[in-house]
Image (spheres, rainbow, N blue to C red):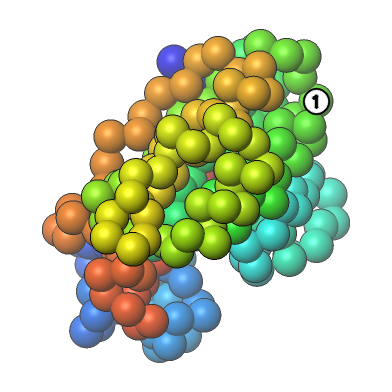
Amino acid sequence: MFPANVKFFSTSRFIENGVSNNNYANFNLANHVGDEPNAVLANRQLLVSHYNLPAEPKWLDQCHSNICVNVDSPFSLKADASISQTPGVVCAVLTADCLPVFLCRKDGSAVGVVHAGWRGLLGGVIESSIKALDASKGGILAHLGPGISQDAFEVGAEVREAFVDSNPDFESAFIQFNNKYRLDLYNAAQIVLVGQGVKSITGGANCTYSEKNRYFSYRRDGEKSGRMAHLIWIA
């Protein structure tokens, strides 16, 4: 349970009055997937008004890195996680299968959100975000937003090998399927969080691939998949 002054949520692929068309229908919030720029701009404006956000979200240029930035001051757009200690500043990441991880200090004095696909998880994006939050061990709360489930996320043997080589505990996040493996992003994120001393972890029950009426999915919809936003701020 996050503190009462911490607000966070994930959008769905549909909203009343959303304007994206075709495969982006109707609430795509990403401007790098081929959607009409004016539609994305209108949807981002609708996001702020519909959800009564305190400010325009601090959008990032995500690149599957382990970079976490503090958006309270000028920051590099090339990042895959952000934190804030300032009330009213909205941290944001976009996903369409990758796992969004919401973080906050137990006392509600700092928040963050992480774009954690398999590359980011392997590269340490969660670790860098927890470090940026600057809380003592056990002082962080985590919530896992909607990502692709293990049943729908097939990867090659080289991905499994890279994970297990970095940490043998990751073995439990994989099951063999024919000549490949299926990766449980939720389990992998939990392994990282527990290793970082996080004791309170919630969420992890959704699947962007199978819940077509709620979520975009790159694996399901292809390159023209839209993106959901995952937002957190201090009220």
Position of 128 relative to 50 (above/below): above
Q: Secondary structure at mark 1?
A: loop
Identified at 59% across, 58% down, the residue is: 119
- The C terminus lies in quadrant: top right
Q: Residue at x 43, y 38 (%)?
A: 173
- Measured as percent of width and height from the top left, residue 31 is found at 50, 78
Pick the quarter of the image with the N terminus.
top left
Apparent side of residue 191 relative to residue 15 in the rendered image (left or right): right
**Residue 52 at what x, y percent from top left?**
42, 45
Question: Where is residue 159 shown, x and y percent of the image?
Answer: 53, 58
Q: Residue at x 17, y 60 (%)?
A: 212
Asked which quadrant contains residue 111, the reply is: top right
Q: Is any atom of residue 11 visible in this view?
A: no
Count of marks overlaid on the render: 1
Q: Nearer the viewer, residue 204 or 69?
A: 204
Residue 207 x, y percent position in the rendering: 26, 48
At label 1, the amino acid type is: Asp
Let me know if residue 213 appears in the view. Answer: yes
**Which image quadrant for residue 194?**
top right
Give the class, few, some or many, for how many residues have Cα within 10 Å of label 1's Cα (few <14, many ≥20): few
Q: Nearer the viewer, residue 52 or 137?
A: 137
| Residue at the farthest left position | 213
Q: Quadrant of residue 26?
A: bottom left
Residue 33 lies left or right of residue 199; in this view the side is left
Q: Is residue 125 above or below residue 79?
A: above
Query: Mark 1 sits on what residue?
Result: 134
48 lies left or right of 83: left
Extreme-front residue of the structure? 179
Asked if residue 32 lies left or right of residue 107, the reply is left
Residue at 44 percent across and 33 percent down: it is: 172
Against 58, is 129 above or below? above
